[in-house]
Image (cartoon, rainbow, N blue to C red):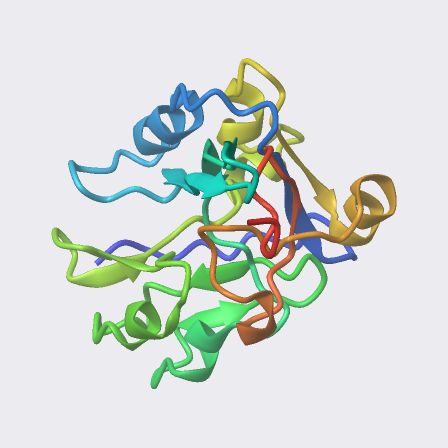
Amino acid sequence: MSQFIDYPPVSDRQLGFFIDSSRCSGCKACQVACKDKNNLEVGRRFRRIYEVKGGGFIPTGQGGMANNVYAYTLSISCNHCKDPVCTKNCPTTAMHKRPGDGIVRVNTDKCVGCGYCAWSCPYGAPQLNAQTGQMSKCDFCIDLQAVGEQPVCVATCPLGAIKFGPVDELRAKYGSLCDVQGLPDSALTHPNLVIKPHQGAEKGSQ
């Protein structure tokens, strides 16, 4: 088992991510940097790039066809939700939401690797560390934040498509949208996530 380090809260307000999907090129630099920083084996990814596509050609009723095809990429990790179901279903309280910054973490001193958190999370954030037999997930690079650095995904994105900070500030600046094509309904867990949608990404736009 790995020793759990309980870093002090890095903020007195809930932290969240802003993802500018309209800028994301799908280069996967954030995903690779996260894997390298956390020394993740093949198949375990704390940040994932989803490729979302759909739509088609719709008859206009006037003998022609209208194009509503869409395709875009979306960078998603743990959303450190306001109402995380992973913490509710953890039988040992290993999965917990910290006071202050609201980061959801796994206390490896308590985790027994039962997997209930992974089965519960609609975003697939908790993942099994096969080497330790315990669950693991994005911890918002709390070790980097503790020394004044940015999460590695934020620092690595070449297009500046990922930002972080107190989620109330992100929502004031970028809006509150987090329901887009390819993601579960935000009402399930109330993710601390703001998304600027790519063309065709907003639910109900098709």
**Residue 49 versus residue 133 in the image, above or below:** above
- Which is nearer the eye, 97 or 176? 176
Asked if one can make out residue 100 in the rendered structure from this viewpoint, the answer is yes
Provide residue 176's location: percent of width, then percent of height.
Answer: 76, 53
- Residue 153 left/right relative to 44: right
Q: Could you tell me which residue is drawn at 72 percent across and 58 percent down?
A: 14
Residue 174 falls in image quadrant: top right
Q: Which percent across, then down, holds residue 71? A: 44, 32
Residue 16 or residue 62, whichever sits in front: 62
* Outermost residue, left side: 131
Place of residue 199 in the rendered image (x, y in percent of width and height, measured from the top left): 60, 33
Outermost top residue: 158
How many numbered callouts? 0
Query: Residue at (47%, 35%) from the top-left corner?
Result: 70
Left or right relative to 9: residue 4: left
Residue nearer the viewer, 154 or 172 = 172
Q: Which residue is nearer to you in this view: 200 or 20? A: 200
Residue 106: x and y in percent read 40, 63
Query: Which part of the image, by quadrant, shows the N terminus?
Result: bottom left
Residue situated furthest front in the rendering: 63
Question: Considering only vertical position in the picture, is 120 above or below 200?
Answer: below
Q: Is residue 48 visible?
A: no
Give left or right: position of 190 versus 53.
right
In the image: residue 140, left or right of residue 92: right
Quarter occupied by residue 13: bottom right
